[in-house]
Image (cartoon, rainbow, N blue to C red):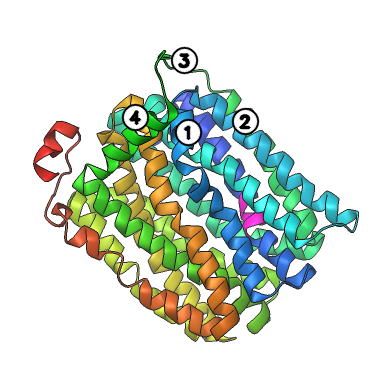
Amino acid sequence: MRNLNLGLLREHDFRQLFVADTVSQLGSQVSLLALPLVAVLVLHASNFQVGALAAFDTLAFLLIGLPAGAWVDRMRRRSVLIAGDLGRAVVLGSVPVAWALHALTMPQLYAVGLFTGVLTVFFDVAYQSYLPHLVGRDKLVEGNAKLEVVRNVTYIGGPTAAGFVIQALTAPFAIAADAVSFLGSALFVARISRREEAPERKPDRHLGREIAEGVRFVFGNRLLRSIAACTGSSNFFSSLTGAMLIVLLARVLHLAPGAIGLFFSLGAVGGLAGAFVTDRVVKRLGQGPAIWISAAVSGPPSLLLPLAQRGALVWTAAAAFMVTSLCVVVYNVTQVSFRQGLTPEHLLGRMNATMRFLVWGTLPLGAFAGGVLGQLIGVRPTLWVGAIGGLLPFVPVLLSPLRHLKELPSRSEELASLQ
């Protein structure tokens, strides 16, 4: 054990967050596959309805993304994490109950997607804002990389396991496993001993002014603007693609749930590799070039998705996912760590919320567009739109100072010349 580079895992509080994230991510892989499969296989939803469901899953980032950051900055972030976990357990638990009572409908799935998304908005903003307090700003890259390992290990094993759980239990009851996982996650977060001080309650505080302060901080910085443009456009096209990919695999290619789960698991192997190699890539290329190069290389492999057919071609498409996932993880770890290191403590929630609003707010728009296009022009043409559009998002970061910055500034004063 002495030879293992455990790093932050030796620290009790980070270890609790690490385990909580592991438990939650494993359960989430079930619902990630089970909710759309409930729509396709149980409720026989149309292509548009499947796209609409994907849109509802992320609509909260567009609706409440900005005020969520201001609210999180007013609260202890650990408490927000626990409440988010418990709330999602209740909401997801309603699906198997309704199905058992023969009362499950598409409107309920839309509501589950929406309310789960609302709780996820608060959880994610609090989680990214809590990490600097938990590990210190000098260990952010290590902390983010280790949590990306968790995410991608569950992406590898989770979908395959989820596919077979769905085959064994049916999709509605498989969602109950995710509900239980959120309860487990809440228990581990509650074990974190390091407490934040309650944020100072200013007598003249105003939600609108606080939101505006976070927005000004992001838009006033040229590097953050370019990162937001790159990530937001990339998420739009990946969401457009994702909305119809599950339809392609389940309805067009008639793959079993276990095979669909294996498809996504194989695609996630690259993400795990990305988490392990990010540090070496950044050291070799520099932080700025690592951001734009990884964004540029992540797009072309998606051109293989519309070509997927039963047999070798579907697994070739899964292999393309591996390359895309590797590049996306390198990009995300590098740019998220930079954002966290740059931002003052009192603005972390609002910075993260503003960025989430800008880059995740495009997810429901892309999913809705995918559903509309899937209904109008068909599944494969829609996948071509997503794949071709996904070639372009790297342009904003390429045209920014990131192109040649080997080491990114860590304080706002150092960025004055870049604004």
Can you say which quadrant of the picture contains the N terminus? top left
User: Looking at the image, which residue is at 12% across and 35% down?
Assistant: 414
Location of mark 2 (residue) = 83
Task: Tell me the element at label 3.
Answer: loop
Task: Mark 4 vs mark 1: give the one in front.
Answer: 4
Q: Residue 51: x and y, percent? A: 60, 68
Residue type at the position of mark 3: Ala
> Sequence order check: which comes first, mark 1 or mark 2?
2
Location of mark 3 (residue) = 198
The answer to whether residue 71 shows anywhere in this view is: yes
Q: Residue 290: x and y, percent? A: 23, 55
Other-residue count near label 2 (Cα within 10 Å), few / some / many at <14 / 14–19 / ≥20:
some
Task: Tell me the element at label 1.
Answer: helix
Residue 63 colored magenta? Answer: no
Q: Are marks 4 and 2 in contact (CB under 8 Å)?
A: no
Q: CA distance from mark 4 to mark 3?
A: 15 Å
Location of mark 1 (residue) = 126
Residue type at the position of mark 4: Leu
> Sequence order check: which comes first, mark 4 or mark 1?
1
Task: Tell me the element at label 4.
Answer: helix
> Sequence order check: which comes first, mark 2 or mark 3?
2
Q: CA distance from mark 1 to mark 2?
A: 11 Å
Left/right of residue 367 with respect to residue 358 in the rendered view: right
Reply above or below: 101 against 246.
Answer: above
Question: Start and end of the magenta stretch?
Answer: 28-32
Location of mark 4 (residue) = 347
